[in-house]
Image (cartoon, grey):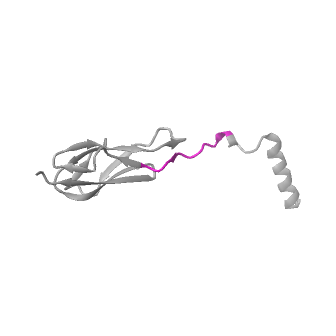
Amino acid sequence: MTHVPLKPFVRAVLALFTLVGGFACGASDVTAACTVSAVRVVTPVMDFAIGQTAQANAQYTVQNCSPVPTIAWASNNTAVATVSTTGLITARAAGGPVSIQATVGAQTGSTTITVVPIR
């Protein structure tokens, strides 16, 4: 059995890879990760009357995302106010503060609303 010194062998293998263009996965095969900026939740009103609805909007930017991540909406107190999958807030009962949250990718933003009793 012939003994091949390791360092010269490794150098020869690396030289061969360099000569033929490297590994099968070149720099052109690497895509940047999808990034989402900070999410900001905007509503036209902060104090709701019972039964009132308003459309919330999530403001953010994305880079290298295909497809663009969807927005996941949530309310931390659905007895007082709910939010639909499209961001429509519905005031159900007096109370608050209620946090309305929008999550896009790994970023979450929120705003706080209050539902006031009807006078």
Q: Which residue lies furthest to the front in this view?
A: 119
Give left or right: position of 40 versus 23.
left
Q: Magenta part mainly helix, strand or loop?
A: loop
Task: Residue 6: name its quadrant.
Answer: bottom right
Give left or right: position of 59 versus 90.
right
Q: Residue at 83% across / 42% down in the picture?
A: 19
Give left or right: position of 116 versus 12.
left
Residue 57 image offset from top left, x and y in percent: 35, 43
Residue 17 image offset from top left, x and y in percent: 79, 45
Q: Residue at 14% across / 54% down in the picture?
A: 117
Front residue of this view, candidates 65 and 95? 95
Q: In which quarter of the image is the N terminus?
A: bottom right
Membership of 29 in magenta stretch: yes
User: For the magenta stretch, what is the residue range?
Assistant: 28-39
Residue 41 image offset from top left, x and y in percent: 37, 48
Q: Residue at 28% across / 46% down in the picture?
A: 45
Q: Residue at 50% across / 38% down in the picture?
A: 66
Q: Which residue lies furthest to the left in this view?
A: 119
Q: Is residue 87 above or below residue 74?
A: above
The mark total stands at 0
Residue 20 image offset from top left, x and y in percent: 80, 40
Membership of 75 in magenta stretch: no
